[in-house]
Amino acid sequence: MTDDPRPSAVDGLPLASLVPGASGVLTGVTLDSRRVRPGDLYVGLPGASTHGARFADAAAAAGALAVLTDAEGASLAAGSGLPVAVVEDPRVAMADVAATVYGRPGDRVELFGVTGTNGKTSTVFLLDAALTALGRTVATIGTIGYRLAGAPVESSRSTITTPESPDLQALLGVLVEGGADTVAMEVSSHALALHRADGMVFDAAAFTMLGQDHLEFHHTMEEYFSAKAKLFTGGRTRAAVVNTADDWGRRLAAMVAAEGAATLVTTLGEDADYRVRWAEPLPAGGSRVLLDHPGGEVEFTLSMLGEFNVANAVTALALIGATGGDVRAAARGLADAHVPGRMQRVDLGEGRPHVVVDFAHTPQAVAAALNALPATGRRIAVLGAGGDRDPSKRGPMGRAAARGADVVIVTDDNPRSEVPGTIRASVLEGARGRGAEVVDGGDRRSAIARALAMAGPDDWVAVLGKGHETGQDVGGTVSPFDDVAVVRELGGQ
Ligand SMILES: CC(=O)N[C@H]1[C@@H](OP(=O)(O)OP(=O)(O)OC[C@H]2O[C@@H](n3ccc(=O)[nH]c3=O)[C@H](O)[C@@H]2O)O[C@H](CO)[C@@H](O)[C@@H]1O[C@H](C)C(=O)N[C@@H](C)C(=O)N[C@H](CCC(=O)O)C(=O)O
Ligand SMILES: Nc1ncnc2c1ncn2[C@@H]1O[C@H](COP(=O)(O)OP(=O)(O)OP(=O)(O)O)[C@@H](O)[C@H]1O
Ligand SMILES: N[C@H](CCC[C@H](N)C(=O)O)C(=O)O
Ligand SMILES: [Mg+2]
């Protein structure tokens, strides 16, 4: 198994500052007893299935020096023989201790954060390309993993968009040691709600948009919005880049302005600081864009399909402008930027249909992705919805697909612990009766085969929902599955 990356040099923290009278210096922090290293603080957190403090014995055996936990965890950890620090919210304390132990690596780089329901990964990749054009050594942290100067940084946690604070602080330390001068990271709403990025001050943070997702975790859109808004208030960022094209963004901009803690930079809305004067599609796909911004006009090209990628590019440039960077030079870096599994073209050769693999897994993203396809032939959408995730987005995803495509083939997308056919039924119900031809395509391979078999040379097949993913989770067993590879295999003739 890949180890969690840790920096070789740390500041450490005298244990006595957490547990008065205790001796020793903490040199690491972990919240998983199976990953404790000698000298660590073990944080016993309450979880969905168990309480981490139950594993204090195992943590002690692995060399932990102390336990940090909540009131419930105190009694569970008592038998471990380790000193126990009890706090009301161990996640808040954990973030602070982790930042201190690892020497606040976030302060030693220019730090950019991106939040929003859709567009975080894409914006971070575009930001990486634009900053690299300015000669920066850029590290990225997000859904597709962690990278330094374009090369992957291996981690056992690399499937988590925003790592838990001990992993995040250690990773930042490794990135700084590796020479990063700039970090661009996705900050998920889970991360904000769970204090994963506490103890860091961003130089600039951006809000892409808000749409329906993750209501199984945040319960209401209001609660979801509040989690996102945390990134822009309370001194967590010096500059706030907010897309004011929709009501949520306008509300956020008003909150930031009222608080007055961060410099507000608006994008895309009427009278925004960064506005697209015009954007025209390029024959080979992508766009040519004229951007108005406080420093003047900038013309640039983008090879990624979709108006929303123009929006993501503008967000990336606004983040750079908000920190005093050269927007014009940065924009040159966008021309060839691509994001794995985001509006990714799969070329099947002459006379074969056009195929796009995309990560659209919310109603808004499905609509945006289908709307981005050039108007030749029919649009054939292949999609499903994830198991153990917000069930209320399934019908709306089907509806968005039926509105945006001529044919909707409903299939599986990581059913996880749920019955695949039941998830498909909800998506099918949303899709039916809206004028599109709607088909239950069964498993994902069969559904992709069906789409490719029915598509003519002018048609567009959009395989949505899994993007860069390389596995399909059915009943907790993950089997290899890569949409791009399957399309190539089945589409070759
Ligand atoms: C579903 C969920 O929210 N899980 C989170 C939760 O795990 P849990 O409640 O299932 O934990 P548990 O199994 O009850 O165990 C409780 C504690 O005991 C510890 N433990 C457990 C067993 C053991 O042998 N030793 C041990 O130390 C665990 O590390 C844990 O801290 O507590 C863990 C930390 O303690 C989190 O890392 C974990 O997030 C997991 C990784 C996760 O996937 N979360 C998703 C929902 C997530 O964070 N997604 C966002 C959004 C992505 C997006 O943009 O859409 C992300 O940023 O990735
Ligand atoms: N600015 C945007 N507005 C609306 N939809 C978008 C935008 N950017 C991307 N999308 C759509 O959302 C999908 C996911 O994009 P991306 O991976 O960049 O988002 P994300 O916020 O990182 O998602 P996740 O939280 O799942 O990691 C894309 O494949 C595309 O279909
Ligand atoms: N970050 C999102 C990704 C969803 C991707 C989709 N393929 C699914 O499995 O639902 C989530 O974990 O909800
Ligand atoms: Mg992402």
Image (spheres, helix red, strand yellow):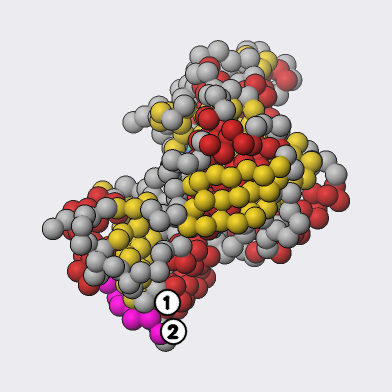
Label whose residue precedes the other's in the sequence (1 or 2): 1
User: Measuring 55% from the left and 44% from the top, which residue is drawn there?
Assistant: 300
| In front of the other: 24 or 381 | 381
- Dot 2 amino acid type: Arg
Of 204 and 214, which appears nearest the observer?
A: 204
What is the span of residues highlighted in magenta in the rendered image? 434-442
* Residue 92 image offset from top left, x and y in percent: 69, 37
What is the number of the mark on residue 232?
Answer: none
Name the quadrant containing residue 166: top right
Amino acid type indicated by mark 1: Ala
* Label 1 CB sits under 8 Å from any ligand 2 atom: no
- Circle 2 Cα neighbour tier, 10 Å, few/some/many (<14 / 14–19 / ≥20): some
**Residue 274 visible in rendering:** yes
Q: Does the magenta stretch include residue 441?
A: yes
The residue tagged 1 is 402
User: Disc 1, disc 2: CB below 8 Å?
Assistant: yes
Q: Where is residue 460 in the image (x, y as percent from the top left)?
A: 33, 65
Residue 54 lies in the magenta-colored region: no
